[in-house]
Image: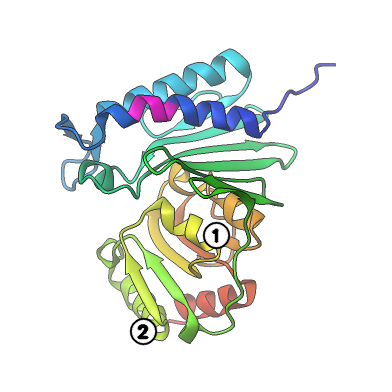
Amino acid sequence: MSVTIKPDQSFFHSLADIAGETVLPFFRRSIVIENKEQDDFDPVTEADREAERRMREMIAGTFPEDGILGEEFESERLDADGLWVLDPIDGTRAFISGLPVWGTLIGYRHMDGTHMGMMSQPFTSERYFGDGKQSFYVGPDGKRAIESRSCASLSDATLFTTTPTLFNEQERAAYDKVEAACRLPRYGVDCYAYCMVALGMADIVIETALKPVDIAPLIPVVEGAGGIVTNWQGGSAFDGGQVVASGDKDLHEQVLEMLTSG
């Protein structure tokens, strides 16, 4: 009987190293930007594609039986026991605007329940890693375990969303109720928002229309820090769609009730 070999944290760092050395030469440079959507603006660059290609090569060479779900190329072996989820540049709009709030997302899920994820920001030299039980930060100010913070009331909460314009009319009405109850709303920080919840610097992230690659790698980071990530109905957020992340589980219930109360 074959024994399944699963990755450790060091392999995530190796993937992040490859992605970082690929992407950084393109950041804050004049580059070609393509639009993946006819009726909207969904940018992609050579940096996105090359970073994902190189990560896929490393995974295939080390864990050839695993599947890969990526942002830029066709999925591979989605029925495999081990599945990698890759977004080489989450926050491409920030990337092409010169803002360092994008990141490389690397996720892994095994059929036995193992779930790990990393957000790497090579320009600021920050990485956030979690396995759903513990989460860790490494950056210019050192390395440490991280925890989300308690927040009993929405009136004390800091709330993130990418932009309220992404919500449809019904979603916007629900979101606006939560925002009005919060102390501090902030927009436009993409994957950084979830990492700030894990770091204990923010309390809530509310999003919609996410792809699995946008959220799956971030779930074990938030949950490993003591937070919670679900869809708006309280179910799994792995497949994306409407997503809520909170650092405080009691606060999370308050947010869900407001979002679904009609």
Q: CA distance from mark 1 to mark 2?
A: 24 Å
Magenta region: 19-23
Q: Give the amino acid at mark 2.
A: Ala
What residue do we see at 36% from left, 64% from top?
161
Q: What mark, if any, has residue 199 been given in the picture? A: 1
194 and 63: which is toward the camera: 194
Q: Earlier in the sequence, mark 1 or mark 2?
A: 2
User: Of tags 1 and 2, which is closer to the observer?
Assistant: 1
Give the class, few, some or many, for how many residues have Cα within 10 Å of label 2's Cα (few <14, many ≥20). few
The answer to whether 86 is drawn above or below residue 166 in the figure is: above
- At mark 2, the secondary structure is helix
Relative image position of residue 196 (x, y in whole percent): 48, 60
Q: Is residue 237 magenta?
A: no
Q: Give the amino acid at mark 1.
A: Leu
The answer to whether 220 is drawn above or below residue 16 in the figure is: below
Looking at the picture, the colour scheme in use is: rainbow
The answer to whether 212 is drawn above or below residue 22 in the figure is: below
133 and 2: which is toward the camera: 133
Q: Which residue is mark 2?
A: 180
Relative image position of residue 39 (x, y in whole percent): 16, 47
What residue do we see at 29% from left, 67% from top?
164
- At mark 1, the secondary structure is helix
Residue 48 seen from this side: no
In the rendered structure, the answer to whether residue 157 lies left or right of residue 48 reads right
Occupied quadrant, residue 223 = bottom right
Q: Quadrant of the C terminus?
A: bottom left
Occupied quadrant, residue 111 = top right
What residue do we see at 47% from left, 51% from top?
240
In the rendered structure, the answer to whether residue 82 lies left or right of residue 39 reads right
